[in-house]
Image: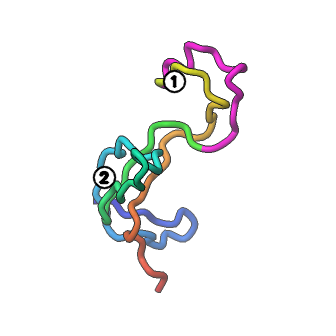
Amino acid sequence: MFVFVCAGCGAELTTPLSQVSLPVHTRQTYGNGAQLPVLMRSGTFAMDPDPWRGPWRRWDETDPGEAEARGIYAPVHSLSEGTRGASVIALGTSVEPG
């Protein structure tokens, strides 16, 4: 079990959580015209191995081999150069401030 805490004061930010795999459809909002259901159960978290957020690098500035290594085989507008390893915490797992 894992508990996320504030880096500044050490206060607990979550209840005890179990680590799970990041769901396959994490970045997909709609599936075949219908909104997808919640993908993670309350009380769980996952680590996202992909870069997330900015800075961004335009496709024409990216080496094709680098994009392919990320599993991207067709041109996209830009690729994230953000930090890898973001924590994804399921809704309903935070602790109320006391």
Residue at image position (44%, 53%) is 88
**Residue 84 drawn above or below residue 65:** below
Task: Tell which circle, 2 or 1, labels the residue nearer the N-terminal end.
Answer: 2
- Residue mark closest to the camera, 2 vs 1: 1
Q: Judge from the rendering whether residue 2 lies leftward or rightward of residue 80; answer left or right.
A: left
Could you classify mark 2 by the number of other residues whose Cα lies within 10 Å: few (under 14), some (14-19), or many (20 or more)? some
Q: Secondary structure at mark 1?
A: loop
The verdict on residue 66 being magenta is yes
Q: Is 76 on the left-hand or right-hand side of 95?
A: right
Camera-side residue of 75 and 61:
75
Residue 47 at x, y percent in the picture: 41, 46
Corner quadrant of residue 90: bottom left
Above or below, 55 relative to 5: above
Magenta stretch: give its range.
53-70
Q: Is residue 35 left or right of residue 53?
A: left
Name the residue located 63 percent from the left edge and 15 percent from the top edge.
63
Report the disc number at residue 19. 2
The residue wearing badge 1 is 72
* In the foreground, 48 or 76: 76
Q: CA distance from mark 2 to mark 1?
A: 27 Å
Going by the numbered disc 2, the residue's amino acid type is Gln
Identify the residue at horizontal 43%, vertical 49% (top origin). 33
Q: Position of residue 83 (x, y in %)?
A: 58, 41
Residue 73 % position (x, y): 51, 19
Q: Is residue 14 depicted above or below 77 in this figure? A: below
Counting other residues with Cα less than 10 Å from the Cα at mark 1, is it few (<14), some (14-19), or many (20 or more)? few
Report if residue 33 lies within the magenta region.
no
Disc 1 residue type?
Answer: Ile
In the image shown, does 4 or 65 lie closer to the viewer?
65
Q: Secondary structure at mark 2?
A: strand
Which of the 4 image quadrants contains residue 67? top right
